[in-house]
Amino acid sequence: MRPISKKILWEIIKKSLLPILIFILIVIVYVHYSTKLAPKIPLHLQQNLKKYISTIFIISITFIIQRIIGGVFCWYKENIASKTTTRLDDELIPLLRRVSKIAIWIIALLIILPIYGVNISALIATLGVGSLAIALAAQDTIANIIAGFMIMVDRPFRLGDKIKLPSGEVVKVLDIGVRRSRFLSDENAIIIVPNLELSKSKIVNYTYGQEQLNSPS
């Protein structure tokens, strides 16, 4: 596994430069405000200014974290995903990147709202119920994605392998997708099977057997 390349490191720095500069500017302004201006400003105005500065501070930190995580995904795509035979991780990287971005901004919002006196307990409860409902509605999709990961890790078959499916067809592996995998039958028909079904059933891999026979003892 190679370290992060200079190109990707430069991309992370370039994308994070503006948020970092804003963050530094906020720190400078806040220090100046605390030492020079705060004693001369009315208390209610001080409280409002503190809220606004805190909000900008949190947003800047969130931008920086988002850029760094984006750089990590770029590094994974360049150094690991591009070298695997399966397209599973290539397809999942954009999805995971979007999910991580949404999660980061949700956390930032939950930190900002209490600054303005918003009670987030009910909001968190609503988000929890909503997440549970989404998870229940998409449980088959989630199960297939997890099964796809397990297939990628366990490697019961690879791209190009000749296998027998649980339904009995002898096929060639064309693609291992996020939710489903595609196979080519002897009749030149494309067979699409959910990953969960593949992970729960017996798979006969003729290619592995042939390689074992041809390997030197």
Image (tube, rainbow, N blue to C red):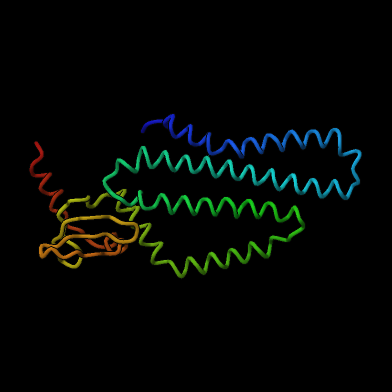
Q: Nearer the viewer, residue 179 or 102?
A: 102
Q: Is residue 165 above or below residue 31?
A: below
Q: Can residue 217 be seen in this view?
A: no
Residue 21 occupies quadrant = top right
Q: Estimate the x, y position of residue 201 in percent, counting from the top left.
A: 25, 62
Q: Estimate the x, y position of residue 57 in percent, counting from the top left.
A: 69, 43
Q: Residue at x 26, y 46 (%)?
A: 85
Quadrant placement of the C terminus = top left
Quadrant placement of the N terminus = top left
Q: Can residue 63 be seen in this view?
A: yes
Q: Which residue is drawn at 8% across and 42% down?
A: 214
Q: Estimate the x, y position of residue 116 in percent, counting from the top left.
A: 76, 55
Left or right for 175, reference 93: left
Q: Is residue 117 above or below residue 80?
A: below
Q: Residue at x 60, y 38 (%)?
A: 18
Q: Estimate the x, y position of residue 151 in percent, counting from the top left.
A: 30, 53
Label total for image: 0
Left or right for 110, reference 14: right
Q: In this view, does 186 lie above or below 152?
A: below
Q: Nearer the viewer, residue 132 or 93?
A: 93
Q: Residue at x 50, y 43 (%)?
A: 69
Residue 168 occupies quadrant = bottom left
